[in-house]
Image (spheres, rainbow, N blue to C red):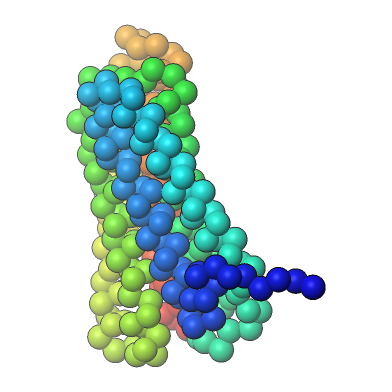
Amino acid sequence: MAMKSTSPLAGLLRKSPFKPIQEHMRTVFACVSLLQPLFDALSAKDLTRVNELAVEISELETQADKQKSVFRLNMPKTLFMPVDRRDLLNLLRDQDALADDAEKISQILISRDMEAPEEIKPLLNELLAGTLEICSEAKLMIEELDELVQVGFGGREHDKVIKMIAGVRSSEGTLDQTLHTLKRTLFAAEETLSPVSVMFWYQIMELLGNMSNQAENMSDRLLLFLSK
């Protein structure tokens, strides 16, 4: 006989399918937010702190994974709401990818002694700050889900979220340009750098770019909710 989950998240799900989505996003954002102090510690060459933060990121990523599993296990097959079950699962997947990428970045930074080349530091800092900002914008959108349900996905709340979605899309476009310029800057400096380090920095750039793409995907999911 299957045992019922005693997780608090499962209890939230029985009340509203959006509550655990929001709880999951809060964990994801806590994980992603540690990237800034992680890069600060790297810049200060504080390897002990880098390792400590990498552990914290991994722990939060694991917590997000557990929340995702509870959501999937306890989610009813039929929801009496204007939101498709599959769309909610896809939104959850997009959120989870943010934590996954944050963990991948942290693991790269502790797998070897990494140091950001001076040539790319300004643009790298700009890309990181922009990535954290777009993740914050995505979190704010998710926090509006309950309000949207209460007003039937319409009214002023609808217009407010539409503006948020437009903001995320605009931010993603700006970050794409920053990422392109950053890659070109690293390319121009390649001959003076270790080929292995260059490879890892390209990986980190791609992961940061993926995170902004996932935030945009989340905005697209919410736009889908609003269009139904």
Q: Quadrant of residue 53?
A: top left
Residue nearer the viewer, 65 or 78: 65
Decide if residue 210 is on the left or right side of residue 156. Answer: right
Residue nearer the viewer, 32 or 166: 32
x and y, in percent, of residue 144 in the image = 33, 75
Q: Is residue 182 among the parts visible in the rendering? A: no
Give the farthest residue toward the right.
Answer: 1
Residue at 52% of width from left, 61% of height from top? 67
Decide if residue 15 is on the left or right side of residue 85. Answer: left
Q: Is residue 223 above or below residue 80?
A: above
x and y, in percent, of residue 32 in the image = 36, 48
Quadrant of the image for the N terminus?
A: bottom right
- The total of numbered circles placed on residues is 0
x and y, in percent, of residue 51 in the image = 39, 29
Q: Quadrant of residue 139?
A: bottom left
Residue at 58% of width from left, 70% of height from top? 6
